[in-house]
Amino acid sequence: MDHPVIIEALRTPRGAAKPSGALHRLPAAQLLGSHLRTLKEQVDVDPDQVIDAVFGCVTQTGEQGGNVGKVASLLGGWSARMSAVTINRYCASGLSAVHWAALQAQQMDALTLGGGVETMSRVPMFGDEAPHYSDKALAHSVGFMPPPWTSDLVATRHGITREACDRYAALSQQRAVAAGRNLPMPSLCPVHGADGGLLLARDETPRESSTAERLATLKPVYEAGAGGLDAWGLAREPGLGQIQHVHTAGNAPCMADGAAAVLLGSASAAARAGLRPRARILAMADACVALTQTGAVDATRRALAQAGLGTRDIDLWEVRDSFAAITLHYMQALDVPLERFNVNGSAIALGHPMGATGAMLVSCLLDEMDRCDLRYGVVAIAGAAGVATASVIERIPH
């Protein structure tokens, strides 16, 4: 059976999501558009051969509204005849976009684009004012709870301590800082402004000064009671006793600006175009778990089963380390060895431009697999409302 292939996967550096951040001056369409132009310049492909594009973006309002992916593809110089859609599966949007584009490529025996964008410094999270964000009664009725609180719930369920969360967060920072200093990242594309000046060449958010001891001084996002959320949760799960609030700004993903683009195709379409794929996607799976952000466990299990592989077959894991307890639970549930997991840091250190992160992880995975001559990798990401998606990817050696 042929599998869809990844011809190229590129990402921008992640900029800090604040007015002083390096990417703040670029609206989402321009940031993704310039990145798509870079992809087109790096890959010798006829744009008319690329039939469709799917991009993730979570807060689709204002500058990020109006099918921002289609606008960006035009700004990036891709064919006006290439269709495009912008999707929202919360934090899993970018990886879902890659999956949808891969499925389209396989079905149509063609080339497609996947990716994502989010400029959180310009279009803030919750800026679309969705009712389940602002209406507590509605949120309670559908079980849509704030991710920091549901992450505390997971920590309480599984006995994950504040100390363990801070240790993991500090490790993510240390790995990201070391990788940024020492490792080649071929898929990382510098971002330039309209005047051609360099805006950002490396990820802006890692903090060298982060240690477990410093993180331990930060105040939790929620205090005891959590404005009534604890009572609501304990009414559903009275056996928990008391919700332990272990998450802070230091062991949660930092907000960021960024974009990613992935060129995909069927194996035969890539061959006809004279393109050498970097990898093939062996399996893709989605899952959802009510209330908490633990769906990536189920999505990964489904993807591994489809691929006929087990945890120990996987050489490298790129999993968005959302709130630390969610990440630690994922590793425990799947028995993932730490030395193969997020080896160059992840969202706690590198930032989380929501609609782009999942697609960014694909390029991060492939760079490290190329560097270390590895075969099998997993990319997984969970998001709000329990949604999650996962891929099993096989590198194609050159």
Image (cartoon, rainbow, N blue to C red):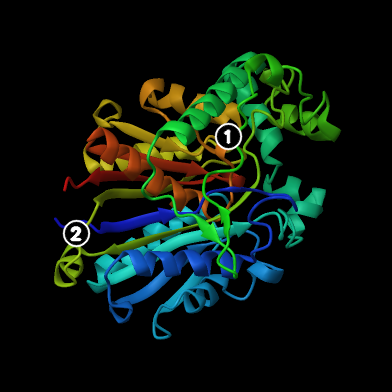
The answer for how far apart the CA atoms under marks 1 and 2 are is 32 Å
Percent of width and height locating residue 340: 36, 26
Extreme-right residue of the structure:
227
In screen coordinates, is 316 left or right of 386? left
Give the structural element (helix, strand or loop) at label 1.
helix
Query: Which residue is at the front of the view, 333 or 102?
Result: 102
Q: Earlier in the sequence, mark 1 or mark 2?
A: 2
Q: What crowding class fits label 1: few (fewer than 14 Cα within 10 Å), some (14-19), or many (20 or more)?
A: many
Q: Amino acid at mark 1?
A: Ala
Give the structural element (helix, strand or loop) at label 2.
loop
Query: Which residue is at the front of the view, 204 or 81?
Result: 204
Percent of width and height locating residue 296: 46, 39
Q: Which mark is residue 161?
A: none
Residue under the point 65% across and 66% down: 27
Is there a contact, CB below 8 Å, between mark 1 and mark 2? no
Percent of width and height locating residue 117: 55, 60
Q: Where does the N terminus fall, quadrant-wise?
A: bottom left
Where does label 2 land, which residue?
276
Q: Quadrant of residue 150?
A: top right
In screen coordinates, is 294 left or right of 214? left
Residue under the point 75% across and 45% down: 140
Residue under the point 58% across and 22% down: 170
307, above or below 332, in the image: below
Where does label 1 land, which residue?
349
Q: What crowding class fits label 2: few (fewer than 14 Cα within 10 Å), some (14-19), or many (20 or more)?
A: some
